[in-house]
Amino acid sequence: MKRIVTMKGLALFAVLLAAFLFFHPSGVKAQAPIKVGIIDTYTGPPTTYTYDVRDAFKVAMDEINAKGGVLGRKIEFTTRDDKFKVDIGLSMAKELVMNEKVDILMGTINSAGTLAISEFCKTEKIPFLVTFSKSDKITGEKGHRYVFSITENTVMIGKAAAVALSKKPFLKYWIAGDDYEYGHALADGVWGNLKKIKPKVELVGQSWWKVGEPDLTPYLTAISAAKPDAVIFATGAASMVNAMKVAKATGFAEKIPMFVHTATELSTLAPLGPEAPEKVIGTSNYHFYYPDTPHNKSFVKAFRDAYGRYPKVGALYGYLTAQFIAKALGKAGKMDREKFIDALEGMKIDSPVGEVAMRAYDHQAMLPMFMGVTKKVPTYSFLIASDIVTIPAKDVMPSIEEIKKARGQ
Amino acid sequence: MGFLPTFGPAELLSQLIVGLSRAMILFVVCAGLSFVLGVLRVPNIAHGSLYMIGAFATYSFSKSLTGSAGFWLALLLAPLVVALISLVAERALFRHLYQREHLMLLLFTFALALILGDLVKIFWGAEYRSVAAPDLLKGSISMLGSSFPRYNLFLIFIGLLVAIALWLFVNKTKIGKISRAAAVDRDMVGLLGINVSWVFAGAFVIGCCLAGLGGALVAPTVSITLGMDHTLIIEAFLIVTIGGLGNMWGALVGSLIFGVTQSLGVLFFPQFAIVFPYAAVVIVLLLRPKGLLKSVW
């Protein structure tokens, strides 16, 4: 039975191929689309972030292709699920390059996986645009000609938080977070930079809980017993929602100022709904309601028309990546990987968050950071960021000297 | 940097209450696990998955009605949903496997945990979910200059209620007495003309129902997410082991040790707090390898 189906399929394929060649006498190759391969985690909790990257990328690509594509060719993309595993991500990257013959790779949300794929792209000379992994090694210590980052990293998060907190009157700090690499990298980033900007600050204590710790109540009550001026939370996604919830239930947020990176971001505030505490200080790369510019509005509208939901921070990364790819291809003049990279270096694009440049030296996109405070508003069923202050990209980027040092130059 | 934070008796008491409330959720779940271990001799790894289903079901039910009514309804219905699932699983699968060796049962329940985990993902998706505490239990109350979340006080109350209900069930009802007897000698109970198969089904459903209740109780205090089953099941097995396998009061003692060492550890040594409950487990097992209370195994 199986054999017959295969035969029929083959016959059908042959007929279609013949028809296709007949109607396209100029040949298939000249018209072939430019192929982008996306590797990301499409199973489990990370999908809260990754679906937005993919969906916004599609919104941008649909716009570009509707106008006839780039260089007279359409841009097409294929996705692969790495299941948040390093080895799967790497083999998917190889498969996309070898079998699917993609011209450009992008993704992923797993830092370790991203670094592995980045090494592969370095040897194979494939441009790789990173959309969500936060390790500063990607464009720092392990950076190279073929890797680009279109997202914030732990150093940028740390600098932004330090700039934001240095303007507050707090002196005695407590640090609390998830006991894993991202948590500690985040905490070290914030604290190191804050100490530099404002040497008077003092660290009075720290609490670290295991990743996935179900109930953070004892940790928060213990911290409130120590009465610090403010608490810096260094948490990943799941604990962030937990921490916010407990902060509200125990009245912690009312008593002690809290800083949580991405506390003000929609990915954190949407699932909490009205359960989110007010007055929490947070930073994020993107808000669908800020900045209130025509570009941001038209992007939000296009995204909502397509998917019926508000774009979260991942959507910005996906949209920016699409814009960078299209503009760089146009400038390169043809699909040539080396020319594409030359074009991308130092390129500036006009985006929903204003002008974003791709720094030529380390291939790190220069993204501004928005600091805000959580607030209830009648317009939405969830809290939003209020009193937003924009911290410009130049204040959060690691310096070229720091990058050189990290790379041992 | 001060190594020991300064605090007074109010903070100590507050921390103790928080620890007790966490212990009560653990107790509700572990009592169920221990009951199944005692009567059926099944180390049910899927118990954590049932707890997760209880939490997700609570989310769905509490969304079905507006206001606090949704939560109270969920507290009632979520354990029943879990009971139903466990009844189906018992009749279709478990009852054919009671005679197998423990390793087989471990592998089987582990597989079931993975399957249930994927079913939860298919049914509820991968997003984080959050359930609001009912209005009555929102916020916190002040006592001795320290504030306790109302919901945590409610948890302590419910935990005591469950403990009393279980004691009455096991000691004062016929079914409870039969299950206790079946735990000691299942062949003898069968010889007395009692349908052991249905006694086992009943015991299994009651045990699993407690997992569902635990899930419902924990829902307002955490973010409901895939993976909450794995975190819990490890703690739950440690607790029933230090308490004495199959002994429900052992589960209570174990939960109290686990919850309170954690919360006090956090207060005294916040940087190393993760270690305390596990250190307590090691100490107990070194001193009493078979658990603190009498194991029925």
Image (cartoon, grey):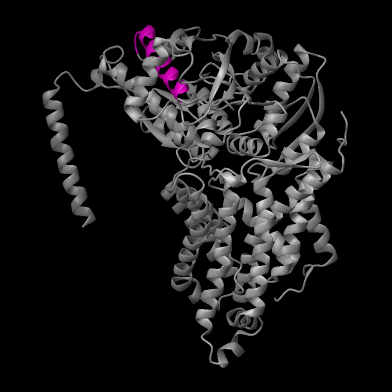
Magenta span includes A329: yes
Residue B12 lies, in percent from the top left, at 83, 45
Q: Main secondary structure of the magenta part?
A: helix
Frontmost residue, A60 versus B16: B16
Horizontally, is A297 left or right of A283 in the view?
left
| Image vertical order of residue A393 relative to residue A281, above or below | above
Q: Quadrant of the C terminus of chain A?
A: top right
Residue A269 lies, in percent from the top left, at 53, 31
Q: Quadrant of residue A133?
A: top right
Horizontally, is A12 left or right of A140 in the view?
left
Frontmost residue, B95 versus B170: B170
Horizontally, is B258 left or right of A13 in the view?
right
Q: Quadrant of residue A203?
A: top right
Residue B271 in view: yes
Magenta stretch, residue numbers: A315-334
Q: Quadrant of the N terminus of chain A?
A: bottom left
| Image vertical order of residue A339 relative to residue A6, above or below | above
Magenta span includes A194: no
Residue A235 lies, in percent from the top left, at 64, 33
Frontmost residue, B111 versus B131: B131
Horizontally, is B150 left or right of A390 in the view?
right
Residue A179 lies, in percent from the top left, at 70, 37
| Image vertical order of residue B88 relative to residue A81, above or below | below
